[in-house]
Image (cartoon, grey):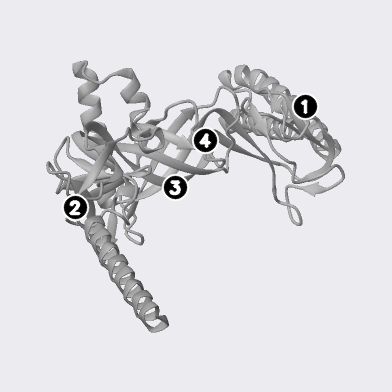
């Protein structure tokens, strides 16, 4: 009886185990046959825009006028009559130099003028006295000629003495150094008590900058100059034809400040140098910016963004959508069947955080925006159309 039960239980256990295995295999097969839902991946639509193409240049700022202040006579400084870094008016007193030696020389020259004028009066009197006598042969003609010669020499001596007096007066005036223009004056390079104008201190005392407008000078290559010249000529023609809007003109030359912000006012071209520097192959350019708030100063590092041209209906995509493999650029396109297709593209210049696509894409095609690692060629996806974030579209501002 025990042997029968044992055999029965063994057979039942084997039957149950076989049944479980069959059930498990069937479930796994059913699970494998059940289709999985396609992965949802964000995509963006490729659109065409009017895209301004800018070129960055670096340069340095200068005042509209930067006038160095020098001592025109030598001597000890006796006074500074301004506050460093302040605005000074044209004609205001800046420095004074000890005038005593020049005043003494002026007095000496004045006495020489008086002496020369006295001699002139005497010789003139001699001529007036001798001329009637010569007419009646009371004196010889040679005496008259000598008197007239002395008169002419005396008159020349007066002119020379007056010229020397004028020169000495000018030097006295140079002991008072005044501002040649209205502007911002810098740090003085000489203090009261220093000897200036000659060795050991023949220095520029200071510099005054007129900063109502700020100039930016920068150098560019010959190729860049040609592009800029054409762009400026085209904008000028468009402005004359009334096709260039004020807003477009204002964005053509922009100044980027040291903190990364954009200067509020637009710039304009002043001039290009007359020749290309043969040693560097570059040409000097200059643009100007209004500086009504006086926040720009001479000597600043300047970064310029200058518009070269506009691309009509340019296709712009975020840089994050692009994959680079050994110098080949690709984007993942969701085709009409919602399958991923690897598309090779050609790229133009960078525009902020985006690329300008020159070949390989068409308008209204959808490209993968996020999840590039999941978007493998041939993969079926569920595209989720999203808007391109504003940080990638700064060129539209």
**Residue 397 position within the rendered picture, expressed as x and y whole percent measured from the top left:** 37, 27
- Tell me which label, 2 or 4, sits earlier in the chain: 4
Asked whether the beta carbons under mark 1 and mark 3 sit within 8 Å of each other, the answer is: no
Disc 1 from disc 3: Cα separation:
63 Å
Q: Nearer the viewer, residue 387 or 83?
A: 387
Asked whether the beta carbons under mark 3 and mark 4 sit within 8 Å of each other, the answer is: no
Disc 1 from disc 4: Cα separation:
69 Å
Disc 2 from disc 3: Cα separation:
28 Å
Disc 3 marks which residue?
Answer: 58
**Residue 318 position within the rendered picture, expressed as x and y whole percent measured from the top left:** 32, 43
Disc 4 marks which residue?
Answer: 261
**Residue 125 position within the rendered picture, expressed as x and y whole percent measured from the top left:** 70, 20
Disc 2 from disc 4: Cα separation:
31 Å
| Residue 229 in view (yes/no) | no
Disc 2 marks which residue?
Answer: 346
- Tell me which label, 1 or 2, sits earlier in the chain: 1
- Tell me which label, 3 or 4, sits earlier in the chain: 3
| Residue 192 in view (yes/no) | yes
- Tell me which label, 1 or 3, sits earlier in the chain: 3
Q: Quadrant of residue 117?
A: top right
- Tell me which label, 2 or 3, sits earlier in the chain: 3
Residue 167 appears left or right of 309:
right
Disc 1 marks which residue?
Answer: 114
Q: Secondary structure at mark 1?
A: helix
Query: Dot 4 surroundings within 10 Å: few (below 14), some, or many (20 or more)?
Result: few
């Amino acid at each position: 009886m025990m042997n029968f039960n044992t055999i029965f239980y063994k057979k039942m256990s084997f039957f149950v185990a076989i049944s479980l295995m069959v059930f498990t295999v069937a479930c796994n097969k059913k699970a494998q046959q059940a289709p999985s839902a396609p992965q949802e991946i964000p995509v963006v639509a490729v659109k065409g825009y009017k895209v301004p193409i800018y070129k960055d240049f670096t340069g340095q700022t200068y005042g509209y006028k930067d006038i160095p202040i020098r001592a025109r006579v030598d001597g000890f400084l006796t006074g500074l009559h301004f506050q460093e870094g302040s605005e000074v008016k044209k004609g205001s007193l800046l420095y004074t130099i000890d005038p005593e030696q020049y005043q003494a020389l002026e007095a000496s020259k004045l006495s020489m003028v008086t002496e020369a004028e006295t001699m002139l009066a005497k010789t003139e009197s001699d001529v007036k006295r001798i001329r009637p006598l010569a007419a009646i042969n009371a004196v010889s003609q040679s005496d008259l000629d000598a008197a007239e010669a002395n008169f002419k020499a005396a008159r020349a001596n007066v002119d020379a003495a007056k010229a020397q007096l004028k020169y000495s007066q000018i030097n006295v005036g140079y002991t008072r150094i005044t501002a040649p223009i209205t502007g911002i004056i810098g740090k003085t390079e000489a203090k009261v008590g220093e000897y200036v104008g000659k060795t050991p201190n023949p220095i520029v005392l200071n510099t005054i900058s007129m900063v109502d407008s700020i100039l930016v000078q920068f150098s560019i290559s010959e190729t860049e100059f040609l592009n800029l010249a054409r762009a400026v000529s085209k904008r000028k023609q468009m402005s004359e034809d009334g096709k260039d809007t004020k807003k477009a003109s204002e964005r053509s030359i922009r100044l980027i400040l040291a903190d990364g912000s954009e200067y509020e006012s637009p710039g304009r071209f002043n001039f290009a140098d007359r020749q290309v520097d043969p040693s560097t192959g570059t040409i000097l350019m200059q643009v100007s910016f209004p500086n009504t708030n006086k926040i720009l100063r001479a000597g600043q590092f300047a970064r310029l963004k200058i518009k070269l041209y506009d691309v009509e209906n340019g296709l712009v995509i975020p840089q994050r959508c692009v994959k680079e493999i050994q110098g080949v650029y690709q984007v993942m396109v969701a085709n009409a069947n919602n399958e991923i297709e690897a598309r090779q593209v050609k790229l133009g210049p960078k525009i902020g955080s985006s690329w300008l696509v020159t070949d390989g894409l068409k308008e209204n095609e959808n490209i993968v925006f996020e999840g590039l690692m999941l978007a493998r060629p041939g993969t079926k996806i569920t595209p989720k159309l999203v808007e391109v974030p504003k940080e990638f579209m700064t060129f539209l501002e």
